[in-house]
Image (cartoon, rainbow, N blue to C red):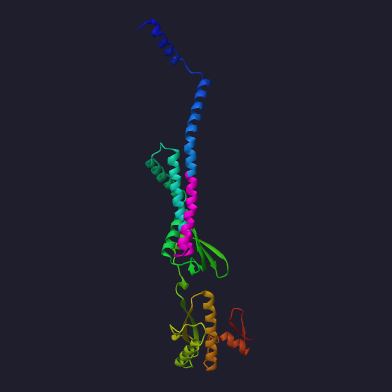
């Protein structure tokens, strides 16, 4: 090799060995970042478009599912399921956007990251997720529906709606009670309006001197005349107990299962039964209390002795 050919190689080696100036290094780094951003901008823009399309599809799916489900299920079921369907579509769009924006990231890596993220979210929002799952299970099981009257957790009223997180109840006093779905799902639920009618009962006490069989006939006949009392099952009157001062009869009728209508029927039934028993001369006495005179009471009544404040007797004189 000639000396002339070796000189450029030596100069190149010398330039490589020479350190790059800090200003030149910053310029190169900035230029590299600009080039990276410029290359990523189309992908980021496309990812934004994918998310936007996903959001539009989310709204369309919600509207379509809500309209379709309302014709087949309850409004609460339609509202919650349409939201879940919309969220699923939006989640798919977000994953697609991430794949477009970061093509080097494999789908398996995204799923692994989703698993770790879901685990963290599960611990952080345990109560919210539990209420959401309980709400979905309540909507699928449907132990009650919007408009039903229920008793749960010492609360009683009309179910206004079952949302994704809570059950909303309007009490008979007009107050709104919001109960978390998980508490509703884990508790005993009483639904008086599950059927069109329900049983109502009240107690009647008649005097021992009266004929119990006659009283039962009078009560049964009176109940059959009350407006709102169902003919089937028929009204009943049954002797249930021999009390201290009365023979107790339990009157039973079936009426509208809604609270307001049931209370009105019960009012009319009690009033009608009392009027019928009074008309037949059947006495309904109050509780009889027997008093036994003590020595101090007799002494106080006779006035032949002094009674101490503690109830003792002190001879007069």
Residue in the picture at 57% in, 66% down: 175
243 and 136: which is toward the camera:
136
Instruction: Tell me if I can see residue 77 in this picture.
Output: no
Residue 306, above or below 178? below
Left or right: where 150 falls relative to 108: right
Whether residue 9 is visible, yes or no, is yes
Residue 94 horizontal/vertical position (percent):
46, 45
How far across and how far down the image is residue 107, in percent? 38, 42
| Residue 234 shown in magenta | no
The residue most toward the top is 3
In-front residue for pair 225/95: 95
Q: Is residue 166 above or below residue 51?
A: below
The answer to whether residue 312 is above or below residue 102 is below
Q: Nearer the viewer, residue 235 or 36?
A: 36
x and y percentages locating residue 299 in the rendered image: 60, 87
Q: Quadrant of the C terminus?
A: bottom right
69 magenta-colored? yes
Answer left or right for 68 relative to 317.
left
Q: Which residue lies at the image location 48% right of the left edge and 61% below the top edge?
A: 67
Q: In the figure, residue 115 lies in which quadrant?
A: top left
Stretch of the chain drawn in magenta: 50-79
Quadrant where the N terminus sits is top left
Residue in view at x 37 percent, y 5 percent? 2
Left or right: 183 with respect to 316? Answer: left
Magenta stretch: helix, strand or loop mostly:
helix
Q: Considering only vertical position in the picture, is 251 above or below 53?
A: below
Across and down, in percent, residue 218 comes to 48, 91
């Amino acid at each position: 090799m000639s000396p002339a050919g070796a000189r450029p190689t030596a100069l190149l080696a010398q330039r490589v060995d020479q350190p790059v100036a800090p200003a030149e290094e910053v310029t190169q780094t900035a230029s590299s970042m600009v080039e990276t951003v410029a290359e990523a901008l189309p992908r980021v823009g496309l990812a934004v478009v994918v998310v936007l399309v996903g959001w539009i599809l989310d709204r369309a799916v919600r509207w379509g599912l809500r309209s379709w489900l309302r014709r087949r299920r309850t409004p609460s079921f339609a509202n919650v399921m349409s939201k879940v369907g919309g969220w699923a579509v939006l989640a798919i769009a977000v994953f697609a956007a991430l794949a477009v924006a970061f093509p080097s990231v494999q789908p398996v890596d995204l799923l692994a990251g989703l698993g770790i993220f879901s685990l963290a979210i599960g611990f952080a929002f345990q109560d919210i997720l539990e209420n959401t799952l309980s709400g979905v299970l309540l909507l699928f099981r449907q132990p009650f529906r919007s408009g039903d009257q229920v008793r749960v957790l010492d609360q009683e009223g009309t179910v206004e709606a079952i949302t994704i997180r809570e059950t909303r109840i309007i009490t008979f006093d007009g107050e709104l009670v919001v109960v978390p779905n998980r508490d509703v799902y884990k508790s005993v639920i009483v639904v008086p309006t599950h059927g069109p009618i329900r049983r109502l009962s009240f107690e009647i006490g008649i005097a021992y001197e009266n004929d119990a069989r006659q009283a039962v006939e009078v009560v049964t006949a009176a109940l059959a005349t009350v407006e709102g009392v169902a003919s089937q099952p028929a009204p009943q009157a049954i002797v249930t107990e021999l009390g201290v001062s009365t023979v107790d009869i339990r009157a039973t009728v079936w009426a509208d299962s809604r609270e307001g209508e049931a209370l009105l029927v019960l009012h009319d039934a009690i009033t009608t039964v009392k009027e019928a028993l009074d008309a037949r001369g059947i006495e309904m006495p109050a509780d009889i209390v027997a008093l036994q005179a003590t020595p101090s009471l007799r002494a106080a009544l006779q006035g032949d002795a002094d009674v101490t404040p503690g109830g003792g007797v002190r001879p007069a004189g």
